[in-house]
Amino acid sequence: MAILEEPIKEPLKLRNFINGEWQESQTKNLRDIVNPANGKVIASMPVSTEDEVKSAVAAASEAFPEWRRTTPLSRVRCLFRLKELMEENFEELSRIQTMEHGKTIDESRGETRRGIEMVEVAAGIPSLMQGSILEDIASGIDEQLIYQPLGVFTCIAPFNFPFMVPLWYLPFAVATGNTFVLKPSPRTPISQNKLAELYDEAGFPPGVINLVNGEADAVSVLLEHPDIKGVTFVGTTAIGKNVIYKKCGETGKRVIAQGGAKNFMIIMPDCNLDATIAALMTSFYGNAGQRCLSAANAVIVGKDDAFYKRFTDAFLSASSKIRVGYGLDESTQMGPMQSPDGKARVLGFIEKGIQEGGRMVLDGRKLKINGDYPETCFVNPTIFEDVTSDMTIAREEIFGPVANIIRVDDLNSAIEMINSSRYGNEAAVFTSSGKVAREVRYRVQCGNIGINIGIAAPMAFFPFCGMKDSFFGTLHGQGRDAIRFFTESKVVIERWF
Ligand code: NAD
């Protein structure tokens, strides 16, 4: 099939969006952003200076008092306009995600759709942000609860969902009357830079939404800044826990920090095998395994050798047919890793898996790429059997298309294995038994549970959860949790003489 037209024809020179203006950074420190499929440079990103980060925060602080006083209906009119612009630019936004990240165009279109849904849900703020009142809590005395915005929030974004993740927060933050400073991932900054053009066009007043490109130094400035009231972060557990959560504790900022994952799929012998295999293909290999909700370990329950063989045969056969190539080729089912580092990381885990006694039944290092592309970032689906829960590949987040197959005797062992993992992002069970499903829902210590669903990604009107080393904070992104996170509760008790 033909390659879809690339929306980026010449390398872009990314700029910062501060106080409603596009500003060229003064830094000499620039990063090339490379399309991982074909190795072409598609943008140059500035590593902004400390002063530039501070000026973004200053712009957001100055914009806050007036934005807060803007009526909720007027605020969400900017979101309605933004939604229209996102729809008008849907295909271009999606293709840009594929170009900077490598995911398939269908995965990018799904990501764009999810991003738009956040804006749609946040547009309900005039209803969702309402407080409550009770008359006569004592004779002639009324008590009311109101929700008020706090000031400036920030988002420190990961590389793997360059378009959607900041939208878990930003629409809810600005709809509730806060202002925002966004720092995109330095590996995939283009989608957010494009989206900022739409924020500009949607009519948000200057300073309400600011974007500053940068790396860890920019994050340090944001974390230390007294005017930043709250931080949203998505990324690795090491940074989320040891840098973001810790610093926010020290500086007294609100925080949502979503970390890494190791997701278990429980396979019961009574599952619908065809539907299960189809769901597992997208869960293990979608986004080339670079999802916090990607399946990592398939846990086959029971001593039924015939079922085990039927499952592994079907799993191997489907995995080896995944078509790997450039995501702008619509026949591609899996793109490359986002970076050479990402590929090196996956290869390191594969080596470790072999050393620790995993039996490799599909070797993704033997590349089959559909088309003439450099091998730099590509890995094919890889499967290990005879994996045990103490092996590194079963415990650590690989973040690539590597599937581990583990056998256990019973459901209880599967649940205990999941609950002994340091992570708690997602688990799924494939079964036709309601009793089994309930047991999993009831006992498994993970924030997002799939019942015959391989990627249990909550919709915009539900919180995106996470437990243990996958989440640091109390309230989550999306849904009503986000509205509570971005507002301060205030109680007023009143009596009139
Ligand atoms: P990362 O931790 O490397 O980077 C995330 C952000 O932190 C980036 O903006 C980066 O500039 C910044 N950063 C990096 N090092 C820093 C430092 N030393 N100090 C301050 N800031 C720093 O994460 P990544 O590789 O971009 O993202 C992949 C990770 O994100 C995976 O672990 C994945 O599971 C996780 N993730 C989790 C969820 C979830 O919902 N739990 C969703 C998506 C991704």
Image (cartoon, rainbow, N blue to C red):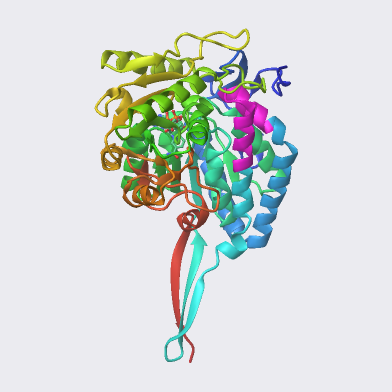
Q: Is residue 77 left or right of residue 155?
A: right
Q: Position of residue 446 (x, y in %)?
A: 36, 44
Give the quarter the ligand 1 occupies: top left
Residue 343, image quadrant: top left
Q: Residue at x 43, y 18 (%)?
A: 382
Residue 188 picture quarter: top right
- Looking at this view, is 63 or 415 the one in front? 415
Relative horizontal placement of residue 53, taking residue 351 as reference (left or right): right
56, above or below 475, in the image: above
Q: Report x, y in % for residue 34.
A: 57, 17
Residue 344 at x, y = what percent?
41, 14
Q: Is residue 461 visible?
A: yes
Residue 163: image quadrant is top right
Q: Is residue 97 above or below residue 153?
A: above
For residue 410, above or below residue 101: below
Taking the spot 70% from the left edge, 51% from the top edge, the residue there is 80
Q: How far from the left and from the top, in percent, is residue 320?
A: 50, 17
Give yes or no for residue 314 being in the magenta stretch.
Answer: no
User: What residue lies at 35% left-to-right and 18% top-to-bottom?
Assistant: 349
Q: Main secondary structure of the magenta part?
A: helix
Residue 55, placed above or below residue 27: below
Q: Which residues are magenta?
A: 93-114
Q: Say which of 291 and 153 sits in front.
A: 291
Left/right placement of residue 437 relative to residue 112 reads left
Residues 155 and 109: in front is 109
